[in-house]
Image: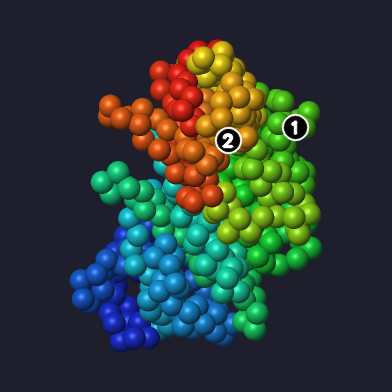
Amino acid sequence: MISQIKGTQLTGSSGETYFMGDLLSTGGQGALYLALSGKGQAVAVKLFRQQFHTDATRRRLAFLHSLRLDQLSDVLCAPLDIVDSGGCLGHVTPFCEGDSITTLIDSGTLAFQEGISVAIALTHAVAVCHENGLTHGDLHNNNALVACHDGYHALKLIDIDNFSIAGVDPSPMLGHPDFLAPELRQRSGRPDVYSDRFSLAVMLHELLLRKSPCSGYDDTREQFVQSMHAGYWLLDPSRETGKVRNVEGYDVRVLNAKLQSLFRRGLSSDRDTRPSALEWRDSLQRALSEVYVCPHCGAPDLGDSGKRSCSMCGGAYRVLALSGNFGKIPLRRATMVLTRQLLGNDATVSARHARIRRISSEYHLEDMSTNGTYRWENHSWTRLSTVELQNSTAVLDLGDRLRFGTVEAEVTHE
């Protein structure tokens, strides 16, 4: 029946008609077609295989349609209508343009910072599902489509019909085998929020690092399955297994300490430790402003106070210093508090006047004083906002002129 659909006309429960077009893809439960509604709107129609034409499937579709998830997040591609006539059972969603995450990774067209932006949208969509008690149940790269419009990458999370929620018939499917949580591989449970969190971690790993969490341990299908059963992050740089190197993707050390910690927890067999989608989102949003480009090799790196060299090429990051009448203060530490004593015991300098935080190759200056910290800009001294008032920082560069109270300094090489 499914193979004979093209060219036919189906009617949805809303009374809308759909003119069936080309087959887009097939999966375990059915097939997806491009179609045109009677109003001229391009839509996607998923039709289930005959064995899934059950009352339970109908109840699930009716419930999913009633949720109107698209009104909660424009990233979620939710059903607009249900088809249950002419021997066909399925649902209608808007047609979503774009390439799958798999296609984007394989093409190499998605920049590192763009990957973080897409990851933020993905975590937001999953968070919306989970906040409403809904498990997606089939999170994998081909169920996330990304379209680029004027340099902006728009994500759509599709194929939500494998969902799970309390009080509704369970899905007959477990999800994509390459993204299954260890407990589902062992057939010891059903998809839930915790298994979604594992699948999300796998997707984020591929988005950010351009490689599977099993990269280097997946020469055969059997080895891949065993690796996904491991119950811990095989590429964890703090483990012996994580020291295996290959040329695929980015080195895991480009991640900052927080994201490494999230992958450590997210890929664990300990379900309770897996981070929520919201925790991922918040950490990724902070990371988006901490992407640095190595001056040696041009590779991206995420800022981290513990990094002293590029994660990809090993090139050492520069070490700056403050120079003035007080002498030279090397800025080697992760955090340096500029005290009155360090700045020559001048009375206009506060006991703890300012703080400089070193994050990879960047130095961030924060004012903590009474008399102010200033930078020479546009032929005048501009006072920095205090940490207490606005939590603002100034990024320092070689040659910057600064003033602490009345004490002047210049940013120089160590």
Q: Does 295 sit above or below residue 176?
A: above
Q: Residue at x 68, y 50 (%)?
A: 266
From the viewer's perspective, is 286 left or right of 95? right
Q: Which amino acid does label 2 sit on?
A: Ser
Q: What residue type is labelled 1?
A: Ser
Task: Judge depth for marks 2 and 1 and give the one in front.
Answer: 2
Mark 2 residue element? loop
Q: Can residue 208 be seen in this view?
A: no
x and y percentages locating residue 257 in the rendered image: 65, 38
Considering the image in quadrants, where does the N terminus appear? bottom left
Q: Nearer the viewer, residue 162 or 125?
A: 125
Q: Which of 404 and 236 is in front in this view?
A: 404
| Res. 350 mark | 2
Q: Does 353 sit above or below residue 45?
A: above
Q: Residue at x 42, y 82 (%)?
A: 84
- First of labels 2, 1 by sequence position: 1
Q: Residue at x 57, y 23 (%)?
A: 343
Circle 2 crowding by C-alpha within 10 Å: few under 14, some 14–19, many from 20: many
Looking at this rendering, what residue extends furthest in the front direction? 347
Residue 12 image-quadrant placement: bottom left
| Res. 66 mark | none
x and y percentages locating residue 262 in the rendered image: 66, 47
From the viewer's perspective, is 49 left or right of 148? right
Cα separation, mark 2 vs mark 1, equals 41 Å
x and y percentages locating residue 10 in the rendered image: 32, 78
Q: Can residue 50 be seen in this view?
A: yes
Looking at this rendering, what residue extends furthest in the left direction? 40
Q: Which of 315 and 59 is in front in this view?
A: 315
Q: Does 316 sit above or below residue 282?
A: above
Reading the image, the residue beneath label 1 is: 238
Residues under numbered marks 2 and 1 in contact, where contact means CB atoms less than 8 Å apart: no
